[in-house]
Amino acid sequence: MNLRTKTAAVTLFSIALAVVLLWFGLETKQRVKSVESQWIDHNDYAAATNYALARINTNFGYGGFIHHFKNYILHQSDKFPPLIEADLDETYRAIEEYRRLAQSESELEALHKLSHVVDIYRFKYEFTRKLVAEGKSPREIETHVQVNDSPALNAIAYLTQHALKDSEESKRRTDHTLSEAIGFINLGGLLIPIIALIAGLIIVFLKRIVSANTMADEAKKYAESLVQAAPEAWLIVGEKGDIVGTNTQALSLFGYTQEEMQGMGIEQLMPKQMRAMHVSMRDKFFAAPSVRPIGQARDLIAVTKDGRTFPIELSLSHTRRNGQLLALAAMRDITERRIAEQRLRLTQQVFDNTAEAILITDSEQVIADMNEAFCKLTGYSREEVLGQTPAMLSAGKHSDAFFRAFWQALDDTGHWQGEIWNRHKDGHVYPSLANISAVMDEKDFVTHFVAVYSDISGIKANEERLEVLAHFDQLTELPNRMLFHDRLRGSLTRAHRHGTYMVVMYVDLDGFKAVNDTLGHAEGDKLLVKTAACLRTSVREDDTIARLGGDEFALIFNGLDTRDPIAMLAQRVTDNLTIAVENDATPLQVTASVGIAVYPSDGETEEQLLKLADRAMYEAKNRGKSQYCFYHEIKNNLG
């Protein structure tokens, strides 16, 4: 082969080699870009979904909405509704953001279940506000607003698990794509050493990129999780005062969304009259960065999106990112602390001057202090009470079960409210409405108990009088129609539970009108009183007699294992109600007609039994009066 031929061959080989290298380079570049694009897409999706999940957990979980909701039920304070509504709004936004990112029907279904539970919680929250406005107690409210949040927890668990599975699947796909690229590059090594060398360099480079990206992503996620998990609100601020980073607590504190706060000037978060001064302070800080921990800086005033101002405590530190100096500001709302300081100044005056009795004990229930109203209520002097325990006031009217429930409530909630009977120094017993609370230290250990007592002797007496007026007939002192129906419902329940018979007797006096017309209503009233006395001798202790109105009475006989005694009981009633009425003219005699209905054979509701007994009573009158009649004897004759 001559030189020209060799030259041509080398040239052709070189050209072919150049073409192969060019194709191989382009193909390799394309495959590398595919791996990089796949990894970046996964990172963007994972970061967005994890951020949405973190916001859902933070705002809806037991550190957010559920925590504030339970505290609202317990304390019924007006400070909680804004927090609850902010938590709900942020939760809905996070769910909606995740829904836009969802890539499968199962994710959408889980988000739907989660949103449904949040909707139920919103409804329960609105209902709770109504109950709070009506003055319901925390215990009453809790019985109405229980929510089964297991679907939400399951949905969150599924979304978390799905994110992990998606991450693993993405890693597997990336590894597979990377393996194919590596295989292609290794194949090129078989062609020429140059391709192998280039492939080796690319492989090393790719591995370093993947490793660096993985480490960077893990470091970024870890840093973000630390900021998001911080109990204080965090802001990251640039030298120009622009906000370049926040956490969920900061968004909640100021009422802005992530998008609204990103890039906002830090001075917008404080009152206008303080902004110029803050610009000067900011310039000095960036000129000579320093660390300023909470507690050593002066308090500042912040302003929310809706214009509400509140005091904050601020700590400052600094860091660098991409060569840029940044300020890290951790903030804490100290509104409650300010309020507590004001309350502390008022506490002593309230304690000394309140009209209600207040008693303070230590954690061992030894009396440490009391006010003058307590001494007036109990009759004891301050010197007689100090160093004693509240047991000295015991009236002995409460059972061990009462005190077990009392201490259980204090252990569970730190609060107990209810009626308690105490004994005065002079020996008389009186009822009090007591509110008892446990006082905790910063480590949640009980240090004291505070009890507030109100004498409710007058209220109890009025309640007893109203109870009698509402449920008893004033003439005969028998239960009235209202109390009769209440006891009839209870009797039906017991008879159904124990499988026994229960009897309703409807009693109407025969000849009562003649007594009223002849002797007057005063004698008629005396006859009704005598009738009530006779009926009392006709029943057992567990039975009930009631006056329904006029000369009509009703009786309930409970706990009959058989029907056999019913006729005997009815005969005793009719015999006892044969009453002679003496007068100067013709003697009068009053008897009774009795109708009988039996549970469960005649009827199973209170309305049925009373109606059927009434029908049977009229049949007894039609038969000649002064006798009894069973409903089952006449039911076939009724149309």
Image (cartoon, helix red, strand yellow):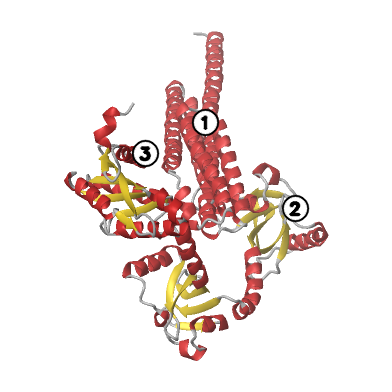
Q: Is residue 625 left or right of residue 211?
A: left
Q: Secondary structure at mark 2?
A: loop
The picture quadrant where one finds residue 330 is: bottom right
Against 426, residue 608 (above or below) is above
The residue beneath circle 2 is 307
The residue beneath circle 1 is 102
The amino acid marked with disc number 3 is Lys
> x, y (%) of residue 89?
60, 43
Q: Nearer the viewer, residue 72 or 18?
A: 72
Marks 1/2: CA distance?
36 Å
The residue beneath circle 3 is 611
Q: Please identify, in this view, whether the residue under mark 2 or under mark 3 is nearer the observer.
A: 3
Residue that extends furthest to the bottom in the rendered view of this protein = 383
Q: Earlier in the sequence, mark 3 or mark 1?
A: 1
Q: In percent of the image, x 50 and y 49: which residue is there? A: 61
Q: Residues within 10 Å of mark 2 (few under 14, many from 20)?
A: few
Q: Earlier in the sequence, mark 1 or mark 2?
A: 1
